[in-house]
Image: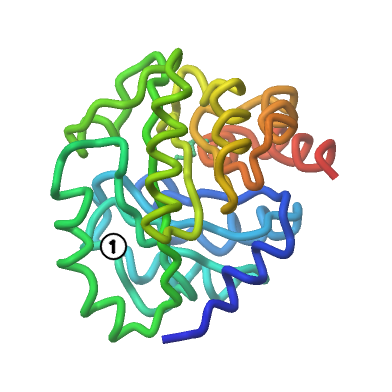
Amino acid sequence: MKTGSIYDQLNGSKPGVFALLDPDRISTEDAGTVTKLVCDNGIKAILIGSSILVTPHFDKFVSGVSDNANCPVILFPGGSHQVCSSASAIFFLSLLSGRNSEFLIGEQVKAVFMIKECGLEVIPVGYILVESGNFTAVEYISNTRPIPRAKPEIAVAHALAGQYFGMKCIYLEAGSGAQNPVPNTMVKKVRHNIDIPLIVGGGLREYDEIRKTFDAGADFVVLGSIIEQSETKFKDIMRRLR
Ligand code: 1GP
């Protein structure tokens, strides 16, 4: 196993933006082009994952990204079937906000031998789903309920539990395509209470809301849908963040 170098590199380069590339929404043929687009615009890392994974070309997609990336490529798996050797690291997620043991520990146990075989750097991440105003894929697939938007103290409790378990990051997730991103009051309170890096994603599409998410204390924000929807808007957001 590699020795924590990607985690250290990212931790030393915060704040920043991660790009989420979903192999179910970007074709394998376009993987290289989209990778160059996000790298040319100052992304700190590329996350690859999907809630369900419809495509049979996952490995080819990850290779297509890795071959064209000048930043770390990190698996962000929706399940134990989303592991392969051409990435450099994996977010070893536990869906702390849910009470579905499959996503707390079951999928992880199924994935470990493959992760070990692949030699991926393992970054343990406490994954916390937050109510977003619509019913998201991650909510449906994980069969878990998100944390209510108006209850930041519940998010703080879960984030601290993750830190006390020894996780190296907390990810506050509204879900891809969320109607509303994670509320900034929640980001602020979680940031104030934990000592590990804080990642925030889901439903972030406008420069102003991304800026405010950073101002509230996010170390990294994750952009996914906007990259697929508008190259111009994505470039503009990244230019204004610099
Ligand atoms: C989902 O947080 C990511 O895991 C990205 O969400 O697609 O809404 O940007 P969006």
Side of 21 where 126 appears, left or right = left
Question: Can you see residue 27?
Answer: no
- Residue 228 position, x and y percent, is 54, 39
The quarter of the image holding the N terminus is bottom left
- Residue 232 position, x and y percent, is 72, 35
Side of 12 where 55 appears, left or right = left
The vertical placement of 209 against 43, above or below, is: above
Q: Which residue is drawn at 75% across and 52% down?
A: 41
- Residue 89 position, x and y percent, is 46, 71
Q: Nearer the viewer, residue 149 or 159?
A: 159
Q: Is mark 1 on a helix, strand or loop?
A: loop
- Residue 69 position, x and y percent, is 62, 69
* Image-quadrant location for residue 230: top right
Report the colour scheme. Answer: rainbow
Q: Nearer the viewer, residue 70 or 147?
A: 147
Q: Residue at x 27, y 31 (%)?
A: 139
Question: Can you see residue 218?
Answer: yes
Tell me if the residue at label 1 has its CB under 8 Å from ligand 1: no
Q: Which residue is drawn at 37% across and 33% down?
A: 129
Side of 159 where 15 appears, left or right = right
Q: How many marks?
A: 1
The vertical placement of 207 against 201, above or below, is: above
Q: Mark 1 points at which residue?
A: 82
* Image-quadrant location for residue 222: top right
The quarter of the image holding the C terminus is top right
Q: Nearer the viewer, residue 66 or 148?
A: 148
